[in-house]
Image: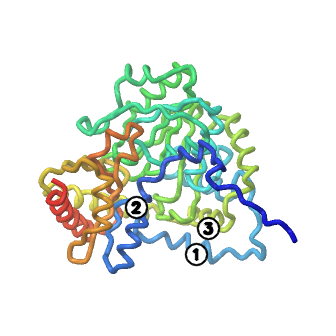
Amino acid sequence: MEKAVTEAPTTSIRISNRARLTPPSPIRKLAHLANRAKAAGTRVYHLNIGQPDIESPPEFLEGLRAFDQKVVAYEQSQGNEALRAAWSAYANRTLNLQTSPEQFLITVGASEALVFLFMTCCDPGDEIIIFDPTYANYLGFASIAGVTLVPVLSDMEHDFALPDRDRIERSITPRTRAILLCNPNNPTGTVYDRQDLEFLFGLCEEHNLFFVVDETYREFVYDDLQPLSMLHLAPQSDRVIVVDSLSKRFSLCGARVGSLITANQSVLAAVLKILQARLAAPTIEQFAAAYMLERIGDNYLENMRREFLSRRDTLYRAVKRIPGVAIHKPRGAFYTLVQLPVRDTDHFAAFLLDTFSHHGATTFIAPAAGFYMQNDRGTDKARIAYVIRSTEIEEAVTVLAAGLERYQQQYP
């Protein structure tokens, strides 16, 4: 008779520190509570995640239908040739740039581009300077790549402007390899101007650093601002790397089509080796994206920009009416931070989803502590994404105000 195999307790099996220390997404970590509220019949207004409700371009959907290959084969690791050419031509036409298709590598969203750039620009333990608050997923990308993010704090009282030179330079060490900037910014909606970009680029030149600029929201700027790319300022610099995406610009979050753009041949060659190791980005979505960029008119993006401007103004007016709440007025992207009269927005956000409803509805916000590396800085703040229709934003803020009043009664 065979002896039964005795299994060791699972607690004796260790997972990696990388996996253990990777932080949960503040954008999605309360999704289970939202799903439970929906299952109970509560309407949930999603102000937590940057998922626009605007319809994707019909040209992209036409491109999906036009795909007629009999086998869905691997694409080239560097990306579909037609897409690289179409993306370059589109950027040149709409932004007056002079890029070439060879400067583009196609990635699975901007997220993959950033993970692979961290791996390319840094060895484990090397450092990248970011500005707190920052896009929460940068923390996860850095953990995956074994990179240390070094935060330099910006503050709401000064509209999240760049910190002064001394504060940034004090954060530069022999292990610093890059400065990373999101422009327009997620989560604050701050737009950095030409002077800001030139200042950071100058620091990178002085200290021999890469300058990585995430331009995912580049065209979404308001108040008479014009889209500005780092490629306008230093198109041929070996230290400039631009990360881009079709997700937000064309309401194609689920297509997962991103790119990195640089004139640095060594970076392109190194990243390509990593792209080859992961084989390729999705074939059909790249085909449809190329089809779209070759045909889409400028009115689609302009209509989106105007719609988000209207939603921003609606949100700003509505939140300003709530006693005790402060809101930063964003000039780009479709996010902002609000400061709430609570001690712990994680607890408050969970309360809204788990135990509260107002006329059968509740509001899902993203606690801001997860957007700060210095978590104690954001415990009274939340990020709001104004990606739903203006009428729904009004309703969501009404629910938020009612929830805040109830919460303060229960947790004075």
Q: Residue at x 86, y 69 (%)?
A: 2
Q: Which mark is residue 62?
A: 1
**Element under label 1?**
helix
What colouring style does the render use? rainbow
- Spatial CA span between label 3 and label 2: 33 Å
Residue situated in front as seen by the camera: 109 or 198: 109
- Give SS at disc 3: helix
Q: Quadrant location of residue 39?
A: bottom left
Q: Which mark is residue 288?
A: 3
Left or right of 222, for residue 326 = left
- Secondary structure category for the residue under label 2: loop
Q: Earlier in the sequence, mark 3 or mark 2?
A: 2
Q: Nearer the viewer, mark 1 or mark 2?
A: 2
Q: Indicate which label's residue lies in the foreground, 3 or 2.
A: 2
Residue at x 30%, y 55% (from the top left corner) = 347
Looking at the image, residue 300 sits to the left or right of residue 110; the answer is left
Give the Cα separation between the discs numbered 3 and 1.
7 Å
Q: Is residue 126 visible?
A: yes
Assess whether mark 1 and mark 3 are in contact (beta carbons under 8 angstroms): no
Specify the amino acid type for callout 1.
Glu
Instruction: Classify mark 2: residues with Cα within 10 Å, few (<14), some (14-19) or many (20+).
Output: many
- Residue 99 placed where, x, y %? 59, 44
The amino acid beneath tag 3 is Ala
Q: Which residue is mark 2?
A: 30
Are the residues at dot 1 and dot 2 in contact (C-beta closer than 8 Å)? no
Q: Quadrant of the N terminus?
A: bottom right
In the rendering, at what x and y percent does residue 95 appear? Answer: 48, 48
Picture mark count? 3
Label 3 neighbour load within 10 Å: few <14, some 14-19, many 20+ = many
Above or below for 4 versus 246 = below
